[in-house]
Image: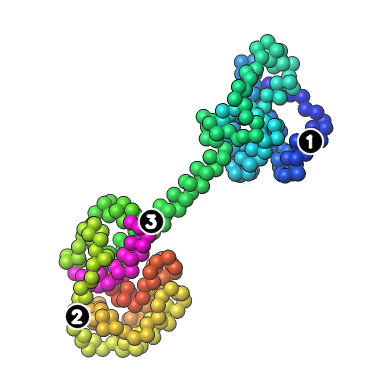
Amino acid sequence: MKWFKHDTDANMDAKLQEIMLDYGLEGYGLYWYCIELVAQNVNGDNLTFELEHDARIIARNTGSTPQKVSQMMTSFINLGLLDADNGHIFCLKLAARCDDFTAKAVRRKGIKPLANQRVGVSPTKSEKVPLEVEVEVEVEVEERRKKKEENNILFDRFWDLYGKKTSRAKCEPKFNKLSEADKNKILEVLPDYVASTPDKKYRKDPQTWLNGKCWNDEIQKQMVFSVDCGIDYDALAGNFNRSMQIWEYVPEVVKVTEKQKSLIAILVSDHKMTNERFKDYFEYCATSGKHDYVLNNANMPAQGLTYFLSEDTIQK
């Protein structure tokens, strides 16, 4: 169809007035845009007067959103400006306003009536995705994407903390199927388990640890006899607190525990750490950005001094 008849006072039509009251010129313009889309596909061999474009395409071409286009299209149907039948959208009124050539074809062939027409109900059985369902699907896809992204962050956190990196392909789906409570419990107890097995060859494979739900087991603390390693524990605690004070979720150290003293003794022995080097190390951890995902995340168990004294953390 090359053209169709358009009344100069169409804007005064009562139904279009309602559209303009609800949506302004955006709704008025969208209606005539839809009519043009219908008309451009009508010819002597195609007299269905069907709107073949979906909400996403129309939204993209008009600068709107699929949700808003779907809402306005439903209003067109409810007011009888467009017709709905078995999930398809039509404008049969256009048959009375088509150009001369198309009008002859309409008179000769007629147009197929809408046997199951349900004016006022938006399409639900289209070969394309129905407008309102399409919006729901997009929301669901976005929610799944966010969930997958959250799972990836939590698993990467577990993987880095565990340190013994074997069978990731089997561990990741196992971890992601766990409840949020189990995931949080794992991240809470894992630093203690890793600290209790500093030698990785004695640490369980991560797949075995997950399959056995070992985060519920009592952790056997590694006994390391305290030694006089020349570290001022009060000064160390003060340096840690000053470095981490910019991070809301890092717990303050009131007193260095015996377990932490044992870890400090190991680091002094293995990495030649001193009071000054500990100070520089804490400052680096707080400002380098490498540990931001554990320092600034309210959804994860807070990581304190013990975490930063672990062998795996300091090697990073």
Q: Residue type at mark 3: give it.
A: Asn
Could you say where residue 170 lies in the image, as x and y percent from the top left?
26, 51
Could you say where residue 69 lies in the image, as x and y percent from the top left?
63, 41
Instruction: Quadrant for residue 16, please give it.
Output: top right
Up the image or down, 178 lies above or below 194; here it is above
The mark found on residue 151 in the picture is: 3
Could you say where residue 59 lies in the image, as x and y percent from the top left?
61, 40
Give yes or no for contact between labels 2 and 1 (Cβ–Cβ under 8 Å).
no
Specify whether 88 is left or right of 274: right
Instruction: Quadrant for residue 47, please give it.
Output: top right
Return the residue nearer the eye: 88 or 206.
88
**What residue lies at 36% left-to-right and 62% top-to-bottom?**
181
What residue does disc 2 label?
224
Q: Residue type at mark 1: give it.
A: Ala
Question: Distance from label 2 to label 3 (Cα)?
Answer: 36 Å
> Which residue extends farthest left?
202
* Secondary structure type for disc 3: helix
Question: Distance from label 2 to label 1 (Cα)?
Answer: 86 Å
Q: What colour-coding does the image apply?
A: rainbow
Marks 2 and 1, the one that precedes in the sequence: 1
Which segment is the magenta one?
178-199
What residue does disc 1 label?
14
Quarter containing the C terminus? bottom left
Q: Residue type at mark 2: give it.
A: Val
Up the image or down, 56 lies above or below 298; here it is above
Quarter containing the N terminus? top right
**What residue lies at 18% left-to-right and 83% top-to-bottom?**
225
